[in-house]
Amino acid sequence: MTEPLRGGNMNAVERDGCTVTRHAGPWTPTVHRYLRYLARAGVDWIPQPLGVECGRERLTFVGGEVPLYPLPTWVWEESVLVDGARRLRQLHDASIGFGMDGAVWQSPAKVPAEVICHNDFAPHNLAFAAGQLTGAIDFDMCSPGPRLWDLAYFATRAVPLTQDPPSNAPGMNHARRRVQVILAAYGSEETWEDVVRVAVIRLWDLADMSRVKAVELGKPELNGDADMYERDARFLAAVSTEAE
């Protein structure tokens, strides 16, 4: 018996025993090939593809708790920043050497194409057990891009970098230190200023995509998400200007 899984707003995901199914697209063969590549490179905490049936892809189920919005208080623990950054570094490093011939991506590739980006690496796509990060899901938006593209988005969602953070989340007065925690755990030489600059661009990109998907998927509520992304982009741009 299948069971709809909550949380996704771009795809209809259902659990079927120890597997999950979701709508497939022209990009699915590339994503499946990429997931197998990561597994061969030693990444054993991600879903593995099992095939495509009647327009739906089937993947192994990643166990653990995936936090839903409003995010629980434990998501804001510093250990989540550290574990998330280290897992993201492992994903990025493992993607090096992936064959690009004939690749089709749902999300446009970005420059410089240093690694394969997850493009939605955030607490709502991470699985936890007893507060420890145990896996990542939802790779259907992955595509080539710079490491900082993923790092900035992870910071946006996990620090968080937002005009109106949830009442249980750290405020912007903690943001610079928490970004530095992410950068140190990842092993990046980027700076707070680099993260904020790319986070602004990333939010505008998300807003544009959400408005397109609102039409394509017939989900006008995505326009509300786009409004939020644009509001946060303007806020972070102002923060960046104030720091100069």
Image (cartoon, grey):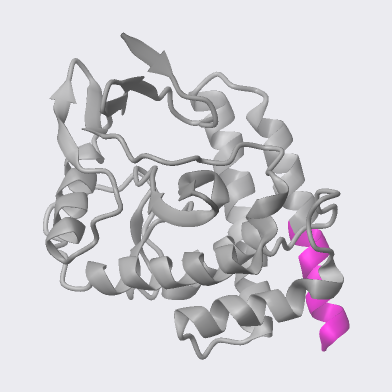
Q: Is residue 23 visible?
A: no
Q: Is residue 88 above or below residue 127?
A: below
What x and y, as percent, mark residue 237? Answer: 78, 69
Asked if residue 224 lies left or right of residue 244, the reply is left
Q: Quadrant of the C terminus?
A: bottom right
What x and y, as percent, mark residue 178? Answer: 69, 75
The magenta-colored residue range is 233-244
Q: Quadrant of residue 224?
A: top right
Residue 201 part of the magenta-drawn span? no
Asked if residue 240 lies left or right of residue 179, the reply is right
Q: Is residue 236 above or below residue 195?
A: above
Q: Is residue 26 above or below residue 174?
A: above
Q: How many marks?
A: 0
What x and y, as percent, mark residue 46? Answer: 29, 50
Secondary structure, magenta segment, majority class = helix
Residue appearing at x 83%, y 62% in the figure: 235
